[in-house]
Amino acid sequence: MSVRCSEIKPNGERCKISVEPPATLSWAHDPANRETRRRIISKAGKSRPNKELATIKQRFSDLADDVLAGTVDKGVAPWLRRS
């Protein structure tokens, strides 16, 4: 039977993550994991955006512009059109 983490978040809400007894804190709130969390957060902060993601975002932006301009039908994806 799992229970909820007993940690209170900075905004005053209780953590919603379930834990298995005898643990009372989630991995994210357990002080034993503090150094690991710090390393993960530091590494994530140093990462650079993926070029593929930037390309996909640009394609969606272009597609949205084309739909708004009326050059692409909003109901049919351009790559699914039959010639």
Image (tube, rainbow, N blue to C red):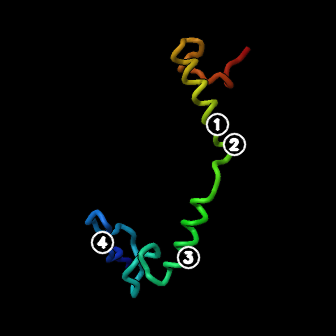
User: Nearest the camera: 15 or 43?
Assistant: 43
Question: Distance between the Cα atoms at labels 1 and 3?
Answer: 32 Å
Q: Residue at x 51, y 17 (%)?
A: 68
Name the outermost residue toward the bottom. 22
Q: Say the numbered circle drawn on residue 36.
A: 3
Q: Is residue 13 above or below residue 81?
A: below
> Mark 2 and 1 residues: CB-CB less than 8 Å, in contact?
yes
The three-letter code of the residue at mark 2 reads Glu
User: Nearest the camera: 13 or 72?
Assistant: 13
Q: Is residue 48 above or below residue 68?
A: below
Q: Which residue is mark 4?
A: 8
Residue 44 placement: quadrant? bottom right
Task: Give the SS element for disc 2.
Answer: helix
Q: Which residue is mark 2?
A: 52
The three-letter code of the residue at mark 1 reads Ile
Q: Which residue is mark 1?
A: 56
Which of disc 4 and disc 2 is earlier in sequence? 4
Q: Position of residue 67 (x, y in %)?
A: 54, 18
